Image (cartoon, helix red, strand yellow):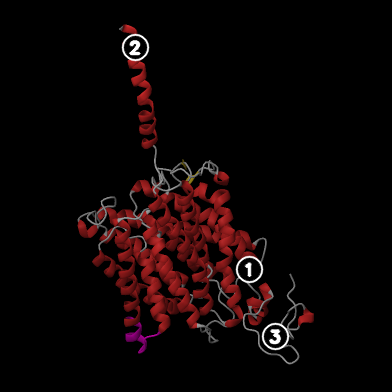
Amino acid sequence: MKILRVIIMALSFLMTLPVLAWAEEAAAPAVDTGDTSFILISAAIVLLMTPGLALFYGGLSRKKNVLNTIMCSFIALGIISIQWAFYGYSLSFGPDVGHFIGSLDWLGLKGVGLEPNPDYAATIPHQAFMVFQMVFAIITPAIISGSVAERMRFPAYLAFILLWATFIYDPVAHWVWGVGGWLRNLGALDFAGGTVVHIISGVSALVAAMYVGKRKGYGRELMIPHNLPMTVLGASLLWFGWFGFNAGSSLGAGSLTTMVFVNTQLATAAAMLSWVIFEWIRHGKPTLLGAVSGAVAGLVAITPACGFVTSMSAIIIGFIGGFICFFSVAIMKAKLGYDDSFDAFGVHGMGGTWGAIATGLFASKAANELGNDGVFYGNPDQLVTQLIATAASWAVAVVGTLVLLKVISLFTKLRASDEEQETGLDFTQHGEDAYTEFVSGSPFGVDMTAGGAPVGAEKPAF
C-alpha cells in the first residue's frame, strides 16, 4: 500500500507540470494582436506625415526651390531611420545613464526583439515600440528645414539633421519619455511630443534661420507660395497622420485612445477657425493658407495635452493656440524681422510652447488617472513642472543648435551663394527642375546632350 501511495503521488505531480508551465508562461508579458496591429498602423500613417510635410513645405516654396524643399524632408526618412537603428533608439530609450541619456546597450538594436518590454509597452513587441518611436524621430528634424528653406546648402543640411538628431533629439526624448529620464522623474507631462518634437524643432528652427541669415531679396522681393493646392494636400496628410501621432501614443487601442483621437480633432478644428477669424479681422479676408496653417497650429498645440485633458479643454487649447501662432507669424515675425521661411518657429515653436504650458493648466486626473491635475483642477505645481520642462527644451535647442551650426560651418559652407539662390536650389544643389518648359529643339525642355541640364544653364560645380 505504501508503494501504491508513492506511485499515485508521483503521477499526480507529473500531471500538474503542464499546468505549472502554463502558469509560468501566462505570467510573462503577452503580445496583444489588436494593440500590435493598431501601433503598426499608427506608425505607418505617422511615417506618411513626413512626405506630407514635404508637400506642405514644397507648395510654400518658390518653384525654383520646390524639389530641394521636398528633398530636405524626404531625405530624413533615410538618414534618421538608419541612425535610429544603429544608436538613436538606444540613446533615447535605452537603460538610463545619470537620468540624462540612454546607454548604448541596445546598439544596433541588440536586445530589441519581438517580446514586449514592459517598461514601455507590455502588450506589443519591443520592435513595434521602437519603430513607432522611429517615425517621430524622422519627422522632427525635417520640421526645421522649413525655417532655412531656399538658402541652406544641402550638404550642410544633411550634416545638421544627423548631428541634431544625435545631440538634441535623442537626449530630450530620454529626458521626457525614457525610463529614468530627469523630466519624466520630475513629473513632466508630454503625451505625444510637445517638448520632444515641437518645442525643440521649432526653437532650433528660429536659431537656424537667424544663424544662416535671410534669403537673398527677403523684404524686397515678393516671395509667395508657388502651389497652394500642394500645401493643402500636405496639410491634409499631416492632419490624417496626426491621429497616429497622438492616438498611437496611447500604445494600445482602447478608451484612452478614443479620447485622444477626439481631442486631436476638436483642437485642430478650433485652431483653424481661430486663425481664420483673427486673420479676417486683421487683414479683411480669410485665406486658404490661413486655414491650413491654423489646422497645423492646432495639431501642434494639442499634442502634449491630448491624453490628459477633457474635450472642452481641448477646444480651448486649440482656439488659443490658433491665435498665438497667428500672432507669431503675422505680427511678431514682421516686427522682429527674422526670415523663418515657412514659419516653423511660429507654428511649431510657439504652438508647442503653448501646448506644454496648457497641459499644466488643463490636465485632469478625471480625464486620465495616469496623468495629473493642473492649475484649474487644484494643482499649481504641475504648471511649475511644465514650465521647467519647457525652459529646459528651449535651452538645449538654442545652445545645441548654435554649437552644431558653428561646428558644421568649420567644414563646409552653410549658406548658398547669392548666385545659387538666384538660379534656384533645385538646379544648383540637385541638378533637377520640377517644372520643365518647352524649349525650341528640345520637346522635354532640356538639352539631352548636356547631361540633362536646363538649356542655357551652367552645370553646377560639386
The residue sitting at the left extreme is 378
Circle 2 or circle 3, nearest the eye: 2
Local crowd size for mark 1, using a 10 Å CA cut-off: few (<14), some (14–19), many (≥20)? many
**Residue drawn at 47 percent across, 77 percent down:** 233
User: Is there a contact, CB below 8 Å, between mark 1 and mark 3?
Assistant: no
Judge whether residue 116 is colored magenta.
Answer: no
**Residue drawn at 23 percent across, 58 percent down:** 375
Q: Which residue is mark 1?
A: 154
Q: Is residue 112 left or right of residue 459?
A: left
Q: Is residue 443 above or below residue 10?
A: below
Q: Which residue is mark 2?
A: 6
Q: Which residue is mark 3?
A: 444
> Residue 74 at x, y = what percent?
57, 67
Judge whether residue 281 is colored magenta.
Answer: yes
> Residue 199 at x, y = what percent?
43, 62
Q: Which residues are magenta?
A: 278-287
Q: Identify the image quadrant of the N terminus.
A: top left
SS under mark 3: loop
Local crowd size for mark 3, using a 10 Å CA cut-off: few (<14), some (14–19), many (≥20)? some
Local crowd size for mark 2, using a 10 Å CA cut-off: few (<14), some (14–19), many (≥20)? few
User: In terms of sequence position, does the residue under pointer 1 or pointer 2 come before the other?
Assistant: 2
Q: Amino acid at mark 3?
A: Phe
